[in-house]
Amino acid sequence: MTTYTASHAAPRRIAGVLDTVLGHLVEIPAALLVLAEIVVLLTGVTSRYLLHAPLVWSDELASILFLWLAMLGAVVALRRGEHMRMTALVGMASPGVRAFLEVIAIAAPLAFLVLVIGPAVEFAQDEAFITTPALEIPNSWRAAALPVGTGLMLLVACLRLVRSANWRLTVAALALVAVVGGIFYSLAPVFRDLGNLNLLIFFVGLVMLTVLSGVPIAFSFGLATFGYLALTTSTPLVVVVGRMDEGMSHLILLSVPLFVFLGQLIEMTGMAAAMIAFLASLLGHVRGGLSYVLVGAMYLVSGISGSKAADMAAVAPVLFPEMKARGAKSGDLVALLAATGAQTETIPPSLVLITLGSVTGVSISALFTGGMLPGVVLAVTLCAVVWWRYRSDDLSGVRRANRAEIAKKLVIAVPALALPFVIRAAVVEGIATATEVSTIGIAYAVLAGLLIYRRFEWARLKPMLIDTAALSGAILLIIGAATGMAWALTQSGFSGQLARTMGGLPGGAAMFMAASILAFIVLGSVLEGIPAIVLFGPLMFPIARQMGIDEIHYSMVVILSMGVGLFAPPFGVGYYSACAVSRIHPDEGMKPIVGYILALIVGLIVVAAVPWISTGFLH
């Protein structure tokens, strides 16, 4: 035993030193990239609106930096073990099995990274032939982020395996992953004859096996997609890297890191404390009062950023600390946050609404008008669950604030409460895009912290920027992997087959609506929202029109169904985004979210059964 310890201590020590060095080499550039994005976008807004001299290169530079931020953030998240994973079953296993699965959770991503690095290098080389329009530089400057990020994650995974306490478990885990990979590879000729049965094997079986084993979600999706395309089709794998790049590079997603950082700023400058003090004075004496505030706050801020993860990032850091202080359990908080994410999918200005309108030809202004009331219906059902859960809370120790106290807290909170209105006004008035508006919020929060609340902790900026990069990388890698999976499903012909099957269902419009709800709940849980809409919207809407279903009504049902799936564990990507944003372990919210998901389904059925809820304001 002594010999074993001596012989393996040195490699582990060297790996530890390398890991620390690598941490500094990645974290500092990642933090600087967050800062650079804020400066570039804020400069673009200022130049266009105040100086009337638009910077044609600002969005392009922001896009280049953004992919680097996403990939380096994913490296930081992997090094910290912060990629979203489901460990409910892992936690129930015996200590020995649990230790083995923890090593599998590193070995499986390692296998994915080995598969993807070659195509990522090829993709970056291909992009060298494309020149960016504004900066006139090869697009490989941006695309190089993919092989560099993949390579760094590969190195991080190897270092983590070397540092593993038990080398026997490490060898066994690597051997198991290699054997499973070898079996799949040897069965390739069989897979090619199975047709769409492969969809069940890879996108249901393999994803479920890896996710339940505790492998991070993004890598589970990536392994299934690469395995499916490599073993059942002749598609070049470089194409999948391109789809992942496309999913992670939507400029609207840049609002994710910026709103994550804005949420941290609001807390650090004391703005959060001022808002909470005022809200608590209004509703603190009500059972579950701040849970109602969370539902209302998500309704108000939803759509500002165009990203649900960013909406949650703007609200959770403000409300959660005080809610925890009042006895709320972490699991219930993240469950309600995820549920409000689904509840507010139809509230304008929403990127999902804009996307749906653009791919189906439905009026976007009509979608904006029709989206308000369905959100209210689902809010009522969620509030009913909140009331039931908190109905017996002991509030004997909570004193109801008088009017003078409420007025005083309102005066202090006004600069903080004004922030959502400043952000919304900037979008409505055309001062800034949905992406840029978060930088206005950041500038406002910095000024309020320095000049009004006189609280700004400079020492916290660096860790806040690094945390922002890590959270953003974890979320964006999931979205990239889900986009690749969505593309693979399209290429399989599954989407067209589904539409034909649903169009031939007996029972007319009512059965089609019920089938659509079930289908989009499932699709929402597997795909990120926008890919699902882009894939299936153009196929399903013509069928709905033929059956006499109002397209605005059908739009609301489809979007809300997809939202329920997107935020429902164990597969819903949105649920893991809520966990990432709130820094609460996914396992904690599994049980509490069931009641909220049932409430959302009840609200969804009401919206589906009563078309007026979606169309009443249109006529």
Image (cartoon, helix red, strand yellow):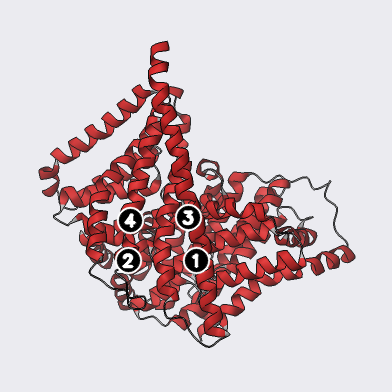
In the image, residue 424 sits, relative to residue 525, either above or below, namely: below
Residue 37's disc number = 1
Of label 2 and label 1, which has the lower sequence position? 1
Residue 563's disc number = none
Tell me, yes or no, whether the two marked residues, 1 and 4, touch with CB atoms within 8 Å: no
Residue denoted by label 2? 507
Within 10 Å of disc 2 (Cα), the crowding (few <14, some 14-19, many 20+) is few
Residue denoted by label 3? 30
Q: Position of residue 354 (x, y in %)?
A: 43, 76
Tell me, yes or no, whether the two marked residues, 4 and 3, touch with CB atoms within 8 Å: no
Label 2 or label 3, whichever lies nearer to me, is 3
Give the Cα distance between marks 1 and 4: 18 Å
Give the Cα distance between marks 4 and 3: 14 Å
Q: Secondary structure under badge 3?
A: helix
Tell me, yes or no, whether the two marked residues, 2 and 1, touch with CB atoms within 8 Å: no
Label 4 or label 2, whichever lies nearer to me, is 4
| Left or right position of 186 against 18 | left
Q: Residue at x 41, y 24 (%)?
A: 10
Of label 4 and label 3, which has the lower sequence position? 3
Residue denoted by label 4? 146
Give the Cα distance between marks 2 and 1: 53 Å
Tell me, yes or no, whether the two marked residues, 4 and 2, touch with CB atoms within 8 Å: no
Q: Residue at x 50, y 75 (%)?
A: 614
Within 10 Å of disc 3 (Cα), the crowding (few <14, some 14-19, many 20+) is many
